[in-house]
Amino acid sequence: WLTPRIERRFDRMIAMGALEEVAAMADRYDPDLPSCKAIGVPELMAHVRGEIPLDEARARAVIATRQFAKRQRTWFRARMGAWTHLRAG
């Protein structure tokens, strides 16, 4: 259930101008800066530079997001084990 949501979210980001935003910062892109390490930025920058097609950048960003979500779930599970899980609805 999570991967389709991540894909839709990234597609919305592209539709709302994420690619143009990354392209606008291409001349001052520094992969060591925290803002340039945000999920999606390195992947889209690789596309802007002509290194990979957009669908590959999308696939890589979706994978990076999914991996980050897994780390979050692991962190919460380790630290919030005694919390009561509430279901929506």
Image: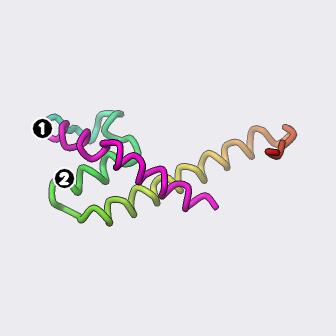
How many marks the image carries: the answer is: 2
Identify which amino acid the numbered label 1 is placed on.
Asp
Residue at mark 1: 27
Residue at mark 2: 48
* Location of residue 11 by image quarter: bottom left
| Residue at the image point whose x is 22% and y is 57% from the top | 47
Identify which amino acid the numbered label 2 is placed on.
Val
Q: Residue 52 carries which label?
A: none
Q: Residue furthest left?
A: 27
Q: Which of marks 1 and 2 is nearer the N terminus?
A: 1
**SS at circle 2:** helix
Q: Is residue 4 above or below residue 27?
A: below
Residue 24 is situated, as x and y percent measured from the top left of the image, at 18, 38
In this rendering, would 1 be left or right of 60?
right
Residue in front for this viewpoint, 83 or 17: 17
| Residue at the image point whose x is 27% and y is 61% from the top | 54
Q: Which quarter of the rendered picture does the N terminus lie within? A: bottom right
What are the residue bounds of the magenta stretch? 1-27
- Magenta segment's dominant SS is helix
